[in-house]
Image (cartoon, grey):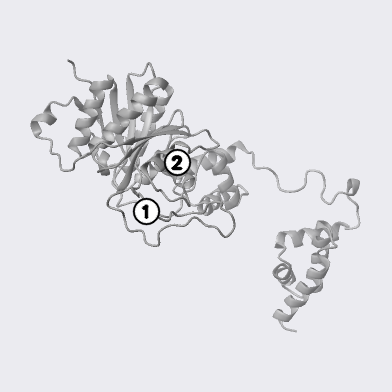
Amino acid sequence: MGQKELVGGIRKKYQALRRVLDERQRRLWAAVEAQALPHGGVSLVAQATGLSRSTIHAGMRELKNGAGKALEGGRIRRSGGGRKPLTDPQLFQALEALVGPTTRGDPESPLRWTCKSTRKLAEELQRQGFRIGDRKVAGLLHQRGYSLQGNAKTLEGSDHPDRNAQFEHINAQTQKFLEQGCPVISVDTKKKEIIGNFSNDGQEWQPKGIPEKTLLHDFPDAELGKAVPYGVYDVGHNQGWVSVGIDHDTAEFATDSILSWWKHMGRKLYPQASELLMMADAGGSNSNRSRLWKRGLQRLADLTGLHLHVSHFPPGTSKWNKIEHRMFSFITQNWRGRPLISYEAIVSLIGHTKTQSGLKIKAQLTRRKYPKGIKIPDAEMAKLNLVPAQFHGDWNYSLLPRGN
């Protein structure tokens, strides 16, 4: 009889018996079958039944030591048997040490990501003497505040030599400000949305056979236009603000949106604040190279009296921005499957976005026009109270209020 026929026969017998045998009986039966076969019996039985080789070997040991000896109280496993919970503090320390060098942040900071795969982490822990698999590593990472990002739109650009150092700087600043009770915000522009009765990705509960009817083609309506949502996410309070613009996504629109957040939410939550830390991408309307952005921040500092501290993410790493996965993703989920027929509908859907973790968002429509192409001359830049940081002053800087 060939190996294929042999495995098939064992599988057929096992499928007939597995429903009437308990865990221990299946283990002993598999051991008997393996011993009855020539060399390689354990592998053949494991292949046919799906049981692990260690389980079959355990059955063999039980047969050798007297399988008829009953367990106490009719138990299948002895007291304390089964997989042990992984609570070893040394394991946690070893795992933290492995992910630490490539972690996007401190445990209490807004950035908590790992670049290493769970399989690689499990292999390294096994080399250190721990018995653990990749699934358990994933569970431990999730338990300790890590998250896993999908591969869509997460490819980072060419590595800047100071990229990791900038992440460490952002984390240190964030931790410092949060410990002092100062506001820390993450800012960015969400994807522009076309207004009209157009299909929106996702599904929504509807009466069976009566789907929401939308236009066949998604050609933008020139009269209705597009919505430009600029968001501000308050890291300390898990709250957000979104200004929904109807014109261009400019640096002036961005800083006006931050000012709106401060007027409507920020100063109520931080009445004693004198400093504000904001995290922003390195491109777009809040680009670190934009003169209009810095002039707008200066105006914001003058109006609020706040010392504004800005840290930009390195180029090509915008998806690490906290607002992306703590606010924008939930807004998208909230309006999935719904056509965004008007600006008012968008504002309402954003404002009703909530999560089990307590996220609350306020939204406001901004009908002001923001022209593009505004140039800021050198003379005006020289008047800004701009203080570059010692480390990468192009990415990290402060705007201080100017005296009257």
**Callout 1: few (<14), some (14-19), or many (20+) C-alpha neighbours within 10 Å?**
few
Residue 125 to residue 216: above or below: above
- Can residue 180 be seen? no
Q: Quadrant of residue 46?
A: bottom right
Residue 24: x and y in percent read 82, 57
Report the side of 268 relative to 136 (left or right).
left
Q: Which residue is depicted at the point 80% across and 57% down?
A: 23
Q: Quadrant of residue 21?
A: bottom right
Q: Quadrant of residue 240?
A: top left
- Name the secondary structure under disc 2: helix
Q: Which residue is depicted at the point 44% across and 28% down?
A: 236
Q: Residue furthest bottom?
A: 1
Between residue 347 and residue 269, name the one nearer to us.
347
Between residue 386 and residue 220, name the one nearer to us.
220
**Callout 2: few (<14), some (14-19), or many (20+) C-alpha neighbours within 10 Å?**
some
Report the side of 17 relative to 391 (left or right).
right
Quadrant containing the C terminus is top left
Disc number placed over residue 349 in the picture, else none: 2
Q: Which residue is depicted at the point 47% across and 50% down?
A: 336
Q: Amino acid at mark 2?
A: Leu
Residue 191: x and y in percent read 35, 47
Mark 1 lies on residue: 155
- Can residue 218 be seen? yes
Disc number placed over residue 233 in the picture, else none: none
Foreground label between 2 and 1: 2
- Distance between mark 2 and mark 1 Cα atoms: 30 Å
- Which one is earlier in the sequence, the residue at label 2 or at label 1? 1
Q: Which residue is depicted at the point 60% across and 36% down?
A: 89
- Name the secondary structure under disc 1: loop
Residue 223: x and y in percent read 28, 50
Report the side of 145 relative to 66 (left or right).
left
Between residue 241 and residue 207, name the one nearer to us.
207
